[in-house]
Image: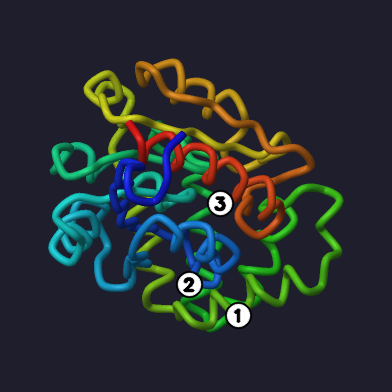
């Protein structure tokens, strides 16, 4: 048996969380108590740049020397760029509801349509239009969830929304870089994620050696809000193993 005097010390795991498009720290509010158990938590600022590489550099400039990196959707794109710029600083990587691929032509047209609405001062309409595709069908009429999404869009604002969309539009294809990722990696995806469907998560997992794939039941694209308990359990298990590795 071991007691408090003989048990090995658990290492601290600072975490850096990167929100998605038009998302504020509210996106990760349900995860903070779980991550906080393992170390200091930083929610990265994504409001200042219109290129993924510049966002990644700015985040690295403010991040701890070493950290666990978590990104959802656009945050996943930025996280993959961080893995290119400074892989030695990342203890563990969690990519949520994201993809390594560049935008399709159809996605680019949709983004440009939403950007045009934002430029016209109709960011709320653009957000409401995109909401049904962002969540599980069972959550399309969830007024509280929609209110949170609208609040995040308001907090990030029109200028940052346009910059973020530009960054996503011009992101590179990260598939050729995935084999270089060697840190422990967890991939999460909703079973009915319409924006970054399951095959894209499977592609990520298959391309990153040793990675784990967690498929979240009854979940769309906004997993941290839609299925917070499932996400937290997955993070708890993953970080617990990472802490003792």
Residue 54's x, y, as percent?
18, 58
Residue 170 in sight here: no
Residue 63's x, y, as percent?
20, 61
- Of residues 92 and 140, the one drawn nearer to the viewer in this rendering: 92
The residue labelled by disc 3 is: 110
Contact check, label 3 and label 2, Cβ < 8 Å = no
**Marks 3/1: CA distance?**
22 Å
- Of residues 237 and 71, the one drawn nearer to the viewer in this rendering: 237
**Marks 1/2: CA distance?**
9 Å
- Eyeballing the image, is 235 above or below 186? below
Instruction: State the residue at coordinates (22%, 22%).
Output: 180
Q: Quadrant of the C terminus?
A: top left
The residue labelled by disc 1 is: 151
Residue 26's x, y, as percent?
54, 72
- Eyeballing the image, is 108 above or below 163? above
Contact check, label 1 and label 2, Cβ < 8 Å = yes
Q: How many marks?
A: 3
Callout in the foreground (3, 1): 1
């Amino acid at each position: 048996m071991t007691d408090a005097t003989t048990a090995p010390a658990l290492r601290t795991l600072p975490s850096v969380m990167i929100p998605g498009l038009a998302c504020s720290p509210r996106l990760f509010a349900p995860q903070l108590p779980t991550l906080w158990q393992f170390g200091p938590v930083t929610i990265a600022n994504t409001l200042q740049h219109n290129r993924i590489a510049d966002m990644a550099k700015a985040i690295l400039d403010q991040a701890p020397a070493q950290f666990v990196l978590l990104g959802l959707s656009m945050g996943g794109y930025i996280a993959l760029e961080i893995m290119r710029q400074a892989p030695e600083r990342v203890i563990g990587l969690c990519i949520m509801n994201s993809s390594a691929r560049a935008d399709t032509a159809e996605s680019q047209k949709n983004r440009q349509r939403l950007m045009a609405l934002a430029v016209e001062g109709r960011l709320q309409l653009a957000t409401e239009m995109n909401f049904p595709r962002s969540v599980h069908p069972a959550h399309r009429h969830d007024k509280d969830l929609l209110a949170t999404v609208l609040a995040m869009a308001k907090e990030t604002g029109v200028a940052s929304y346009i910059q973020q969309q530009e960054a996503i539009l011009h992101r590179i294809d990260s598939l050729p870089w995935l084999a270089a990722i060697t840190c422990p990696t967890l991939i999460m995806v909703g079973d009915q994620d319409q924006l970054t469907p399951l095959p894209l998560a499977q592609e990520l997992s298959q391309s990153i050696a040793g990675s784990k794939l967690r498929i979240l039941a009854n979940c769309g694209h906004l997993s941290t809000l839609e299925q917070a308990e499932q996400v937290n359990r997955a993070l708890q298990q993953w970080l617990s193993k990472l802490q003792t590795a």
